[in-house]
Amino acid sequence: MPTLRVATYNIAAGQNPDPQAINRLFTEENLDLIGVQEVDRHTRRNPYDMPAAIAGTRYHAAFAPAIPVMGGDYGIALFSREPLLNVTNHHYAHFGEEKRVYQHGVYEVAGTPLSVYNTHLSFETPALRQLQVAELTAAMHADPIPRQVLFGDFNMDQSHQEWDYFDPALRRANGGAGGWFDTFNGRDAGMQSFAIDNILVTPNIQLSQVRVPSRILSDHQLLAATLTF
């Protein structure tokens, strides 16, 4: 049965992340596929190609710009051992003070296609996030590939009940059989929940070995899991 080690990680571009340290973390965790949020490319605060620097020689990077920032781009990225196929970027129709995006690609695993999604939802209100989840869910339901994984910083910071916006058939790494992981390690008086990063999969994929490594390289923790299908 095909097996992948995957992760989601918000790397906090505004805090000048160390791309080599992030690459080492990905390598130490033996990751095959990673969804990353808060990524800069050629901005004044991070004046280099951050996706390429994180990828190094081990990974392939696919970047999705969300908004222009400080002379460059800010968005999300997917990293993979083998190149993703048919990568597309999509802006949400509903957003707050910043435009938000999700990206989609296809990853071949032993001849089996896996549909891969990555996103970073808005922080302002649960109602806004619910609208974005509806857009994303519609895209996933229309997807002809039956096996799907979704990475993201979903900013669901008011209650665990916000996760009920998603199709209940989806399995969650965070809030699943292993309980909740507080993946945001900063402190924000407006937040009621810190379990805001997650990996969701369709029911035909098994989730196991969910863990949050102790290394701190961002104001979020990396969330990793093994997928078997």
Image (tube, grey):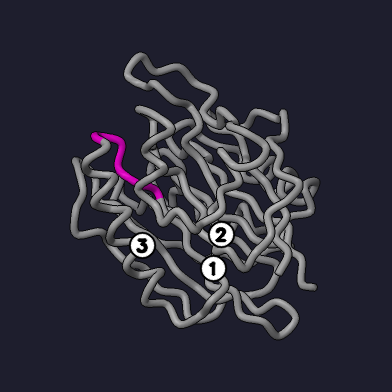
Of callouts 3 and 1, which one flags the residue occurring earlier in the amino acid sequence? Answer: 3
Q: Is residue 185 magenta?
A: no
Task: Please name whichever residue, 175 or 61, is drawn nearer the observer in this view of the structure.
Answer: 175
Q: Main secondary structure of the magenta part?
A: loop
Q: Are marks 1 and 2 in contact (CB under 8 Å)?
A: yes
Residue type at tag 3: Thr
Residue type at tag 2: Val
Instruction: Pinpoint residue 98: horizontal percent, then vertical percent.
Output: 24, 45
Of callouts 2 and 3, which one flags the residue occurring earlier in the amino acid sequence? Answer: 3
Instruction: Pinpoint residue 134: horizontal percent, then vertical percent.
Output: 28, 57
Q: Which residues are magenta?
A: 120-125
Instruction: Pinpoint residue 110: horizontal percent, then vertical percent.
Output: 75, 81
Q: Secondary structure at mark 3?
A: helix
- Label 1 belongs to which residue? 148
Can residue 47 be seen in this snapshot? no
Task: Judge the density around disc 3: few (<14), some (14-19), many (≥20) Cα neighbours within 10 Å.
Answer: some
- Label 3 belongs to which residue? 137
